[in-house]
Amino acid sequence: MPRRRLRRRISFMPEISHFAPLGHGLLPEEIILTLDEFEAIRLKDLLAMEQEKAAEQMGISQPTFHRLILGARKKVADALVNNKIIKIQGGDYEMIAPIKGRGFGGLGRGMGRGRGLGAGPVGFCICPKCGNKQPKVPSLPCTQIKCKKCGALMTRS
């Protein structure tokens, strides 16, 4: 019997969960990029982190990280070449965040695979026009919330 799969640790939650090709008349096919695959691409390709270090940060082995990044890159390449929507969601993960002076520590658990509440990180949204500050709505990015005072789209504080 195989051992239980470990949750992958992620430290970044994207504000936008869909990327779609423009100018295509038909409704394109959709691929799912899990949050742990997204985190692997972020650490390796955006932050140029070594695989060993990235695997350690995610709490997985280097060979597992390698398989994860290969699968994620294949999905992104498929979406770009074949005009598919990339939908970022789910996965088996644990949300972590930097703690000042202590590195990374667990601050909550993502339920993954659609079982979570989608609450995301707590905080405030700020209006770039009038400076109005209001609490962040769970599961809704600040960029989709309109200011109650002036109607402009909010930004994350």
Image (cartoon, grey):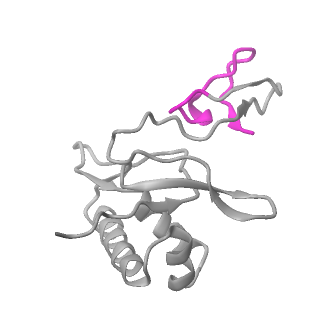
Across and down, in percent, residue 100 comes to: 79, 59
Across and down, in percent, residue 83 comes to: 29, 58
Across and down, in percent, residue 111 comes to: 40, 45
Which residue occupies 36% across, 77% down?
Answer: 64
Residue 4 vs 133, above or below: the answer is: below
Asked whether 33 or 59 is in front, the reply is 59
Q: Quadrant of the N terminus?
A: bottom left
Q: Residue 138 in magenta? A: yes
Q: Residue 146 in magenta? A: yes
Which residue sits furthest left? 1
Asked whether 105 or 13 is in front, the reply is 105
Asked whether 60 or 67 is in front, the reply is 60
Quadrant for residue 143, please give it: top right
Asked whether 132 or 97 is in front, the reply is 97
Q: Quadrant of the C terminus?
A: top right
Looking at the rendering, the stretch of residues picked out in magenta corresponds to: 137-157
What's the magenta bit mostly, secondary-structure-wise? loop
Is 4 placed left or right of 144 in the picture?
left
Quadrant for residue 47, please give it: bottom right
Is 131 placed left or right of 99 in the picture?
right
Q: How many marks?
A: 0
Across and down, in percent, residue 89 comes to: 38, 48
Which residue occupies 66% across, 63% down?
Answer: 104
